[in-house]
């Protein structure tokens, strides 16, 4: 890509001169055109999205109007005025006796999970007084599938295991990215009559769920759902006692597809629960949702009590976070500023904790000359409890994440009254990451925020920053619910970027059914990283899983030791599951050049300042073109030239891309897919909104056209009660705990070393069946363990240190039934359909595969419970006469459909904003509901995520590309580059490559555009 020169402009006149002086002091003399345009829109009160690509200075574009507003507000607050009104507490519905879990059953898609704090970087989490004590769990682990690779343990193929979310002491639903945390998500069948490729997405729903009436209840586990036996009720008068545990604010430490190892929050470090909640701020029943301003007091461990304050609880021991108030700072007018009162505030939302922390540092440096008018502070699970009170009371620029907003801030809005009353701007950084189920949840969280702000008389302007996106204004409008203008013309300079597509070579080994085997992307990336570090090239290798990050760093360190003893220490891994201080240290070391190479999950993809990189390696296609360019754009910051290398994995999609570069370079990035009206998403947010403030008829329009019918259902089920003031939440549990906004669910599994009792980490419930089943090989920080026992009831996997000469891979069976057909299109005698389905899958065994060669050493049976998912699917059916006319023999049909299913799943990410691991599939030579040979492809999220619907509307183009990918592969009978799947639970058997081409030719011969 050629270099580009920049185009300057002038800042709008409304920008405060002090802000312009601070920018100049930072070495920025004039803005780029897109920065000035964005600031101008914001200053006019227009919500705006800036979508100008990586390293284009988007953060400065939204910071300038924010800083100006904070200075204006500080000046206004300093002028004499009448005392502000004290906000009145709202009346709340009396809590009814009993636990809602018994009556919430039947709403699948969300639920209550008992007693988990999924962040657990400090060990035990305090329980809720009067209800019992719940021990927390350690930080999020991963559930990577283990696939053979040519270097030892295979690249983890669990592409987004790094995205967990949140829990709270005693009542929180937790899990790690639903369908993405699938580990092994295979196909299976019975006598080849029902071969399924399926996504492992959550633990079984044990009892509690919230699902639309017409959907019915499920008794298995749904991706994105939380199972469990209810939550802990709040303490007396809505105030729980901190019990010495380090609670959390509602999120977890996981990386995320979109998230860094800390999407949400991690637990504290033994700090007392001083915020009037159960060892956690904003996460115990009633404490943050029902306390009237000035009414709550809480006794945390150690006996420290809080006293009433204007916004809830102002603790006597509150202290500002380091750097929030500059030492000896003066106000913008030159007088010593009092750290009291706020004239204007701003809220910053990041998808990851790493990004929020990085942005706080950037704001602190830029705003240092502006004095205490700008008090920037992070509010997440890494924030010590004694600092959280200060942030609520005095912070003017609060940086947090959607998980904390959902679980901590909105339920406790009375404590944030003075902040919310003055809220001028809401900054949503990296907004392109809010897609699918997660994006749909965030959209509803933002609608709840707008509603609460209106309660306090505020109408904030939304400032969104995005990577290059298709129709960013429309995507931002769907996300926020308000009109948004877009700025897309990038006027910043750019150095030359050399982008290489790298296909690893074939080895002399043979894989399944004699298929040729390529060197793995993991091994190839490790070797490239070694070469680049040896040359002194600062490089980040982006990988798809925590396991791959650890493995690439380990391989590179071993190889570098052979070159120079000083080099291994200059390479490291970066992922979720590390302590916050470890992550921050790695970021500093990369920034200052002590580290030359880093193998990272997507945590570093999102805006964290790692300027000065010379090269970026991508170990496999990241799933979307938006992510591809976001990762590649991390190299060459500052206008210097850079190198980006996409190292292809041996699968149909990566192989297709390296042989069809136009699919990457000649196409726009994908549209952002999200569906805020998904009833599985909307229902729990209506409950949460009613708990925050009674829902009125007028409120329903804010939440979308489906809200009225869903409120009626919730009222029928006794979850909401209508009174003169509107609909009230009737239960003792915190309504915010009904759902995990990242679309996962289930109680995380603690991985414990049996000999020592040492807690190694956790694995998401969604991946536990495939990754820590009895006999599984588990990799943790470069060491190998063998799982001796998986106890699902107690959520514990016992492991022991071992060095087995094999890896393991789970196999499962899948069944699917059609619940309803919403749209159907005839393709000649064939039919293309879209509708609702129920998928049931069960892990039944696991394979032991020899390291290096992948040779199957044996299969062991497992006895694990089935899990059920209600979702949306696209499917196509052909008649027997059609197939006979195409020359597909009956004995070829199972392998033909199976191969077509694999390849179609592999190619769908080119046409829908999804990853292969977001979707599942199953093929049937004769399906009982259709009565015909049928292939299904379904969303791996409860209620659907929009991917299957997108597949339906692009079916002809999508399936044509699928057919081309199979036919153009040079192999004889099928290989990972065309029809073999890395997540096939049926051992990629049967597969018939040539018959699959004939089936697709037959299907497409009468295809029409949809």
Image (cartoon, helix red, strand yellow):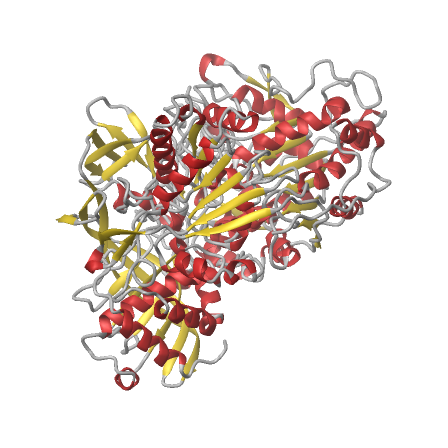
Look at 65% across and 46% down and name the residue there: 464
User: Toward the viewer: 364 or 993?
Assistant: 993
Residue 6 is situated, as x and y percent measured from the top left of the image, at 74, 45
Residue 642 is situated, as x and y percent measured from the top left of the image, at 57, 42
Q: Residue 980 sits in which quadrant?
A: bottom left
Q: How many marks?
A: 0
Residue 552 is situated, as x and y percent measured from the top left of the image, at 37, 37
Look at 35% across and 64% down and name the residue there: 903
Look at 56% across and 40% down and name the residue there: 635
Position of 108 relative to 531 (above/below): below
Q: Residue 806 sits in which quadrant?
A: top left
> With 84 as the anchor, is 180 left or right in this view?
left
Position of 960 relative to 459 (above/below): below
> With 384 as the anchor, is 458 left or right in this view?
right
Residue 379 is situated, as x and y percent measured from the top left of the image, at 57, 30
User: Toward the viewer: 746 or 499?
Assistant: 499
Query: Does residue 173 appear in this view?
Result: no
Query: Does residue 140 appear in this view?
Result: yes
Position of 548 relative to 137 (above/below): below
User: Toward the viewer: 627 or 390?
Assistant: 627
> With 904 as the anchor, is 273 left or right in this view?
right
Q: Residue 823 sits in which quadrant?
A: bottom left
């Amino acid at each position: 890509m050629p270099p580009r020169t920049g185009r300057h402009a002038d800042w709008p006149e409304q920008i405060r001169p002090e802000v312009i002086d601070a920018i100049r002091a930072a070495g920025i003399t004039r803005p780029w055109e897109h920065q000035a345009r964005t600031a101008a829109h914001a200053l006019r009160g227009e919500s705006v999205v800036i979508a100008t690509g990586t390293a284009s200075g988007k953060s400065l574009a939204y910071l300038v109007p924010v800083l100006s507003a904070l200075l204006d507000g500080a000046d206004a607050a300093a002028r004499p005025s009448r005392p502000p009104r004290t906000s009145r507490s709202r009346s709340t519905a009396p809590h009814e006796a009993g636990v809602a879990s018994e009556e919430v059953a039947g709403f699948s898609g969300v639920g209550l999970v008992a007693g988990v704090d999924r962040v657990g970087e400090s060990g035990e989490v305090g329980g809720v007084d009067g209800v019992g004590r719940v021990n927390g769990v350690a930080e999020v682990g991963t559930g990577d599938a283990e696939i053979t690779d040519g270097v030892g343990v295979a690249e983890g193929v669990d592409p987004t295991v790094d995205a967990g979310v949140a829990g709270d002491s005693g009542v929180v639903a937790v899990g790690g990215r639903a369908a993405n945390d699938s580990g092994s998500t295979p196909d299976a069948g019975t006598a080849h009559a029902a071969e399924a490729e399926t996504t492992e997405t959550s633990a079984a729903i044990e009892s509690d769920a919230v699902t639309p009436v017409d959907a019915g209840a499920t008794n298995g586990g749904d991706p994105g759902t939380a199972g469990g036996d209810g939550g802990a009720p709040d303490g007396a008068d809505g105030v729980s006692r901190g019990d010495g545990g380090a609670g959390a604010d509602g999120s977890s430490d996981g990386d995320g597809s979109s998230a860094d190892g800390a999407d949400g929050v991690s637990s504290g470090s033994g700090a007392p629960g001083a915020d009037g909640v159960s060892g956690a701020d904003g996460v115990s029943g009633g404490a943050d949702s029902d306390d009237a301003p000035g009414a709550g007091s809480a006794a945390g461990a150690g006996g420290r009590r809080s006293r009433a304050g204007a916004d809830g609880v102002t603790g006597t021991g509150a202290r500002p976070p380091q750097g929030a108030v500059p030492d000896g700072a003066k106000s913008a007018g030159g007088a010593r500023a009092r750290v009291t009162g706020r004239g204007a505030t701003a809220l910053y939302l990041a998808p990851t904790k790493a990004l929020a922390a990085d942005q706080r540092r950037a704001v602190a440096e830029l705003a240092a000359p502006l004095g205490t008018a700008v008090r920037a502070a992070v509010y997440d699970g890494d924030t010590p409890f004694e600092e959280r009170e200060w942030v609520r009371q005095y912070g003017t620029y609060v940086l947090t994440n959607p998980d904390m907003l959902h679980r901590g801030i909105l339920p406790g809005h009375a404590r944030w009254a003075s902040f919310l009353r003055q809220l001028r701007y809401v900054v949503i950084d990296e907004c392109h990451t809010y897609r699918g189920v997660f994006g749909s949840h965030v959209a509803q969280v933002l609608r709840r925020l707008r509603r609460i702000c209106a309660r306090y008389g505020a109408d904030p302007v939304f400032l969104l920053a995005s990577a290059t996106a298709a129709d960013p204004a429309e995507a931002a409008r769907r996300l926020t619910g308000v009109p948004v203008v877009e700025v897309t013309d990038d006027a910043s300079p750019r150095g030359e970027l050399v982008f290489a597509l790298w296909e690893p070579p074939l080895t002399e080994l043979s894989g399944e059914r004699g298929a040729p085997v390529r060197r793995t992307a993991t091994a190839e990336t490790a070797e490239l990283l070694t070469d680049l570090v040896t040359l002194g090239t600062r490089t980040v290798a982006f990988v798809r899983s925590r396991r791959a990050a650890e493995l690439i760093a380990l391989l590179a360190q071993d190889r570098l030791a052979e070159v120079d003893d000083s080099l291994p220490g200059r390479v490291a891994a970066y992922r979720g599951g590390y302590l916050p201080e470890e992550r921050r240290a790695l970021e500093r070391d990369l920034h200052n050049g002590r580290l030359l190479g880093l193998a990272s999950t997507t945590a570093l993809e999102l805006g964290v300042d790692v300027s000065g990189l010379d090269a970026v390696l991508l170990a496999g296609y990241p799933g979307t073109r938006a992510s591809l360019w976001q990762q590649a754009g991390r190299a060459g910051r500052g206008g210097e030239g850079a190198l980006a290398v996409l190292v292809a994995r041996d699968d149909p999609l990566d192989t297709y891309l390296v042989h069809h570069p136009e699919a990457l370079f000649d196409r726009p990035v994908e549209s952002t897919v999200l569906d805020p009206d998904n009833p599985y998403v909307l229902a729990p947010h209506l409950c949460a909104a009613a708990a925050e403030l009674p829902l009125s008829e007028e409120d329903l329009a804010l939440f979308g056209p489906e809200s009225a019918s869903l409120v009626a259902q919730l009222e029928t089920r006794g979850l909401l009660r209508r009174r003169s003031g509107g609909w009230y939440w009737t239960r003792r549990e915190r309504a915010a705990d009904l759902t995990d906004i990242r679309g996962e669910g289930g109680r995380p599994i603690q991985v414990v070393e049996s000999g020592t009792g040492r807690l190694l980490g956790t694995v998401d419930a969604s991946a536990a069946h495939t990754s820590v089943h009895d006999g599984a090989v588990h990799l943790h920080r470069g060491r190998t363990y063998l799982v001796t026992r998986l106890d699902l009831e107690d959520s514990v996997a016992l492991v022991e240190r071992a060095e087995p000469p094999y890896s393991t891979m789970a196999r499962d069976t899948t069944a699917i039934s059609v619940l309803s057909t919403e749209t159907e299109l005839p393709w000649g005698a064939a039919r293309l359909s879209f509708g609702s389905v129920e998928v049931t899958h069960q892990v039944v065994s696991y394979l032991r595969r020899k390291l290096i060669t992948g040779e199957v050493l044996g299969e062991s049976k497992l006895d694990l419970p089935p899990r059920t998912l209600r979702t949306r699917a696209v499917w196509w059916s052909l008649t027997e006469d059609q197939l006979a006319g195409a020359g597909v023999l009956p004995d070829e049909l199972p392998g033909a459909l199976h191969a077509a299913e694999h390849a179609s799943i592999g190619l769908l990410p080119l046409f829908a904003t999804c990853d292969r691991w977001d979707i599942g599939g199953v093929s049937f030579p004769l399906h009982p509901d259709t009565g015909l040979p049928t292939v299904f492809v379904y969303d791996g999220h409860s209620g659907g995520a929009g991917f299957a619907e997108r597949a339906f509307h692009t079916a002809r183009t999508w399936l044509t590309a699928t057919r081309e990918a199979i036919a153009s592969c040079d192999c004889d009978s099928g290989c990972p580059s065309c029809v073999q799947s890395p997540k096939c639970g049926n051992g990629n058997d049967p597969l018939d490559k040539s018959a699959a081409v004939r089936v697709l030719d037959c299907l497409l011969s009468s295809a029409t555009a949809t």
